[in-house]
Amino acid sequence: METFYRTVEELKKLSDDNKLADLLWHHEHGMVKIDHSDSEYMSWKNSLPVLLNVLYNSGLSNLVMVLEYETPLGARIDAVLLGYNHKHGDQIMLFELKQWSRIKSTNNLSVVQVSVGINAQGKRIWDPRLHPLQQLLTYEKHLKQVVIDLPALK
């Protein structure tokens, strides 16, 4: 699949115009009808605008951001920000977006408990999930094993 990337400014404009989530849906799912209740779609609709506003307001509007980058090992990274630092050269920042409303820690630092609903007795249902930082560390390992073929950043 072709990599989906734009500058932060271009993505923010698409987001401000309420076009970004739909565009990503069609990029990922082709002409399949948009499922507005899909968790992936909701993440694009709710989390990406917040991230893009922070980056834009931080003066990073000219940097390139890749969305839903699929690593050769099959993982998909929500967002990859590409930049250049005169001291250190090319820079990459990875983002893992979540729609979690309630979490709690566990004895295992790599895992968190995520609230996934309420049962018939009114008690929360908790599900163990990989901690987002652990996901990002895994993605970092994947990226170190490959060369990303993207436009020059300099």
Image (tube, helix red, strand yellow):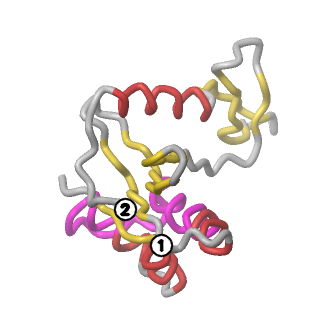
Magenta stretch prevailing secondary structure: helix
- Residue at 38% across, 57% down: 66
In the image, taking residue 90 as reference, residue 117 lies left or right, namely right
Q: Is residue 41 magenta?
A: yes
Callout 2: 10 Å neighbours few (<14), some, many (20+)? few
Residue 78 position within the rendered picture, expressed as x and y whole percent measured from the top left: 46, 50
Q: Which residues are magenta?
A: 24-50
The one nearer the camera, 49 or 41, is 49
| Element on which disc 2 rests | loop
Residue 131 position within the rendered picture, expressed as x and y whole percent measured from the top left: 63, 29
In the image, which disc is placed on residue 62?
1
For the C terminus, which image quadrant? Answer: bottom left
Callout 1: 10 Å neighbours few (<14), some, many (20+)? some
Q: Is residue 48 above or below residue 15?
A: above
Please tell me how many numbered marks the rendered image carries.
Answer: 2
- Residue at 61% across, 63% down: 51
Q: Is residue 1 magenta?
A: no
Label 2 amino acid? Lys
Q: Is residue 24 above or below residue 132?
A: below
Quadrant in the picture for residue 67: bottom left
The one nearer the camera, 82 or 141, is 82
| Element on which disc 1 rests | loop
Q: Is residue 143 above or below residue 60?
A: above
Quadrant in the picture for residue 65: bottom left
Label 1 amino acid? Asn
In the image, taking residue 48 as reference, residue 54 lies left or right, namely right
In the image, which disc is placed on residue 154?
2
Quadrant in the picture for residue 141: top left
Residue 35 position within the rendered picture, expressed as x and y whole percent measured from the top left: 40, 65
